[in-house]
Image: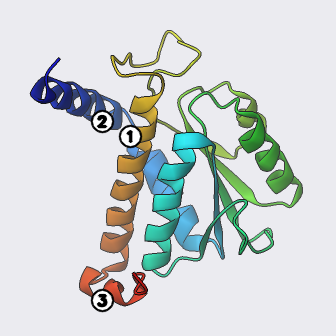
Amino acid sequence: MDYTASIQLILGELDLALNKVDEEKVGMLIEDILGAEKVFLTGVGRVMLSLQAFAKRLNHLGIDAHCVGDITEPAMTPRDILIVASGSGCSIVPVAIAKKAKELQGKIIHIGSNQNGDVAEYADYMVRIPVRTRLYLEDEIPSEQPMTSLFEQSLLLFCDAVALMIIDNRKLNIKDYWRAHANLE
């Protein structure tokens, strides 16, 4: 497969996946992000990399966001939300963190593919990106990409779409937010 064919395959899969996300749930997620005192995010591997990019963008927009496990992570309170990203919904560490967040009375939102994963027990609701996971469930969108690449890519682009919607919701001038960008680089 050449470069052009690879890009067309990836973009086609992303288009299909992102257009299957329930817009009502996206609205709920944005409402919860904007209503929270702090936003916590957790996942593992490449999923966590996508969430780290989202946490940085939320902070650019003036939203107090933290990746679980960071050295500067503050305490969670009932006024906060935890966004758990896991395609399968069964990854051990995110499920354990969701359980702890529920004990702390935080709101938990799962972004993933498997509606019946272990995290469902703790999540207040799920935003579903119905793509192929390691479980190979019948209702998942298949992918020709390796492993769970489509979920990780979809998550990153989904989070960028959410950030754009927050900018629009708050009528923000994105030029003003360069002041929050890292400047020691």
**Tag 2 or tag 3, which sits nearer the N-term?**
2
Task: Indicate the amino acid at tag 2.
Answer: Asn
Above-or-below relation of 83 to 131: below
Quadrant assignment, res 38: bottom right
Q: Which residue is mark 3?
A: 176
Secondary structure of the residue carrying tag 1 is helix
Disc sitting over residue 153 in the figure = 1
In the rendered image, which quarter contains the C terminus? bottom left
Work out whether mark 3 precedes mark 1 in sequence or the reverse, and give the earlier one: 1
Q: How many marks?
A: 3
Asked if marks 1 and 2 touch (Cβ < 8 Å), the reply is no
Residue 47 coordinates in the image, percent (x, y): 53, 43
Q: Of marks 1 and 2, which one's residue comes earlier in the chain?
A: 2
Residue 20 disc label: none
Inter-mark Cα distance, 1 to 2: 14 Å
Could you say where residue 124 lies in the image, as x and y percent from the top left? 69, 47
Task: Identify which residue, 67 or 76, lies in the foreground.
Answer: 67
Residue at mark 2 = 19
Q: Residue at x 48, y 82 (%)?
A: 62
Asked if one can make out residue 96 in the rendered structure from this viewpoint, the answer is yes
